[in-house]
Amino acid sequence: MPRTNTVTPPSFDELDRVGATFTQTKDPSLEGIDMQNVVLDSVWVNVFGFALVLSLALGIATIYAMLRTYQIRKEEKKYYANKPLSGVARRVFGIEGASAGSAHEMRWRSVVEHANSDNPNDWRQAILEADVMLDDVITSRGYTGEGIGEKMKQVERGDINSIDDAWEAHKIRNRVAHEGSNYQLSQRETRRVIHLYEKVFRELGHT
């Protein structure tokens, strides 16, 4: 009679024991680790590294720009300090043919140097002095009054077409004089105002 082998299927208790044994064989170093946090931490490390490199690059660019600006201003100041007076300046102040060291020429050169200075107080001084010079020019044209404002009120546009430029420059002068340091004056604005005074001088034939 042939011999038969019977296979007894494992019971549920045995399967549970196998599962428990398998669970215990997991790598204990992975327990308590949140993979999502690991990925996020890795991303933030990369972002921080990129931001750091970008900040360093911007910092270097800013320092370079500041150095270049300083060099340019230094060259401008040197250029204008050594630049000869224009025909406008000489004729306005009656120094045609005067020596280079005359008091009048030194006065105008002082205005130019103040306008190109790095000191905001010098910019204010340049405008105040230029307005005094404008007063002298208007007075030399025969206009009278207690101040330059009273004199310019007598000027017709047909007489001086650039009288509006003179008024604009004079109004800024008044703000500089009355408001002091509270009036925010830039070097660009200072040069623009000085140019307004020069436009008036040029129209009056002092070119």
Image (cartoon, rainbow, N blue to C red):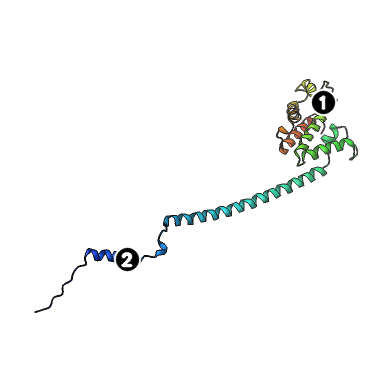
SS for tag 2? Answer: helix
Residue lying farthest bottom? 1
Eyeballing the image, is 1 above or below 11?
below
In the rendered structure, which amino acid carries the disc numbered 2? Answer: Phe
Please state which of residues 89 and 186 is positioned toward the viewer in this rendering: 186
Residue 22 numbered mark, or none? 2
96 or 123: nearer the viewer? 123
Disc 2 packing (10 Å; few <14; some 14–19; many ≥20): few
Q: Quadrant of residue 90?
A: top right
Query: Are dots 1 and 2 in contact, CB under 8 Å?
Result: no
Question: Compared with residue 101, is residue 151 higher up or lower down, i.e. above or below?
Answer: above
Q: Is residue 86 visible?
A: no
Q: Which residue is denoted by mark 1 in the rendering?
A: 138
Q: Quadrant of residue 20?
A: bottom left
Q: Residue at x 52, y 53 (%)?
A: 47
- Local packing at callout 1 (Cα closer than 10 Å; few below 14, some 14-19, many 20+) is some
Quadrant of the drawing holding the N terminus: bottom left
Name the kind of residue labelled 1 in the image: Ile
Measured as percent of width and height from the top left, residue 36 is found at 42, 55
Alpha-carbon distance for marks 1 and 2? 105 Å
Instruction: Give left or right: position of 164 versus 4.
Output: right
Q: Mark 1 or mark 2: which comes first in sequence? A: 2
Residue 177 position in % (x across, y down): 76, 29
Q: The C terminus lies in which quarter of the figure?
A: top right
> Which x, y percent locates residue 103?
89, 36
Q: Nearer the viewer, mark 1 or mark 2?
A: 2
- For this rendering, which residue is in front, 55 or 72? 55
Q: At 74% from the left edge and 36% from the top edge, which residue is drawn?
A: 190
Which residue is at 46% across, 54% downward?
40
Q: Quadrant of residue 34?
A: bottom left
